[in-house]
Image (tube, helix red, strand yellow):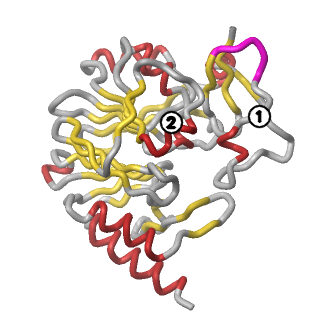
Amino acid sequence: MICFICTACGTQFGERQEPPQSCPICEDERQFVPEAGQQWTDMRSIGRTHEVIWKKEAEGVHSLEISPSFAIGQRAFFINGPAGNILWDCLSLVDEQSVARIKAAGGLAAIVISHPHFYASMVEWSTVFNGVPIYVHADDGEWVQRSDPALHSWEDDTMPLGQATIVRCGGHFAGSSVLHCPWLEGGRGALFVGDTMQIALDRKYVSFMRSYPNLIPLNARTVEGIVEAVRPYPFEAIYGAFAGRTIKKDGMSAVVQSMGRYMRAIES
């Protein structure tokens, strides 16, 4: 029995003898099936050709990426927290070096996932750390491809996690969420956004989309809702889903200005 992994989106499926016939996450309009068709691999195969690279982004924040880039190519984050360490979003590969490094730093208290494109091998990561809880918003529960007792489906618009807060913003997916960590950046706060907001290449603005690869925008009301959801939480830095996509200062100001720019662009 093998837990197959989709090579296009990096999602790990439950145990089976043969690969799935399709990947529902890739077939959804927000993602895509590659021109060559759906292809599959597994954890052991990825581990033979790839590794997880760590980078210190700030005090108490490390990014993790698979190298060479695999599937969507997102970065996950290991966050040192006063109530225990958090893994924000996930990767398809669990490697021995990362496991040892996290254990040496005190292990994990929680795995928090922004949305289905970054589910990756979340159950595998949890299993390695003794079934640490995985928090996925209930609105996105239908997209989970590997069930496990560690999965915790949370509801409502916010969920406290020690001093951190998970905030459901919606938009990209119904349950798309961000993580607010007020103790970071010298107490000025940091926001981890996944794809709920996509940090622009100028690292001054963010943008908002239903589908980034297929270029499907969101309407004005939805974008306003995303911004209002994070407005109560002060933050200096914004950590996006991909390497280099970090806004290092005046994060809230950047979000508000980005909303204004977006609204002007879609006005009829």
What residue occupies the far right of the structure in this picture?
36
Query: Residue 69, how many percent across, how many down?
Result: 62, 38
Q: Is residue 40 left or right of residue 136?
A: right
Residue 207 to residue 153: above or below:
below
What residue occupies the far bottom of the structure in this picture?
268
Residue 81 to residue 2: above or below:
below
The residue that disc 1 covers is: 22
Q: Is residue 148 left or right of residue 21?
A: left
Name the chief secondary structure element in magenta: loop
Q: Callout 1, which amino acid?
A: Ser
Q: Give the position of the C terminus as an image quadrant.
A: bottom right
For the point 30% across and 23% down, the residue is: 108
State the count of labels. 2
Q: Give the position of the N terminus as an image quadrant.
A: top right
| Camera-nearest residue between 25 and 184 | 25
Looking at the image, is mark 2 or mark 1 nearer the viewer?
Answer: 1
For the point 44% across and 14% down, the residue is: 127
Q: In this picture, which residue range is highlighted in magenta?
A: 15-19
Looking at marks 2 and 1 on the same chain, the residue that comes earlier in the sequence is marked by: 1
Query: Residue 34, how many percent across, how many down?
Result: 79, 45
- Look at the numbered disc 2 and give the secondary structure of its residue: strand
Residue 23 lies in quadrant? top right
Q: Residues within 10 Å of mark 1 (few under 14, many from 20)?
A: some
| Camera-nearest residue between 82 and 202 | 82
Query: Residue 136, how many percent across, how many down?
Result: 42, 37
Q: Is residue 218 magenta?
A: no
The residue that disc 2 covers is: 65
Q: Callout 2, which amino acid?
A: Glu
For the point 44% across and 74% down, the residue is: 221
Query: Residue 204, how many percent across, how many down?
Result: 39, 69
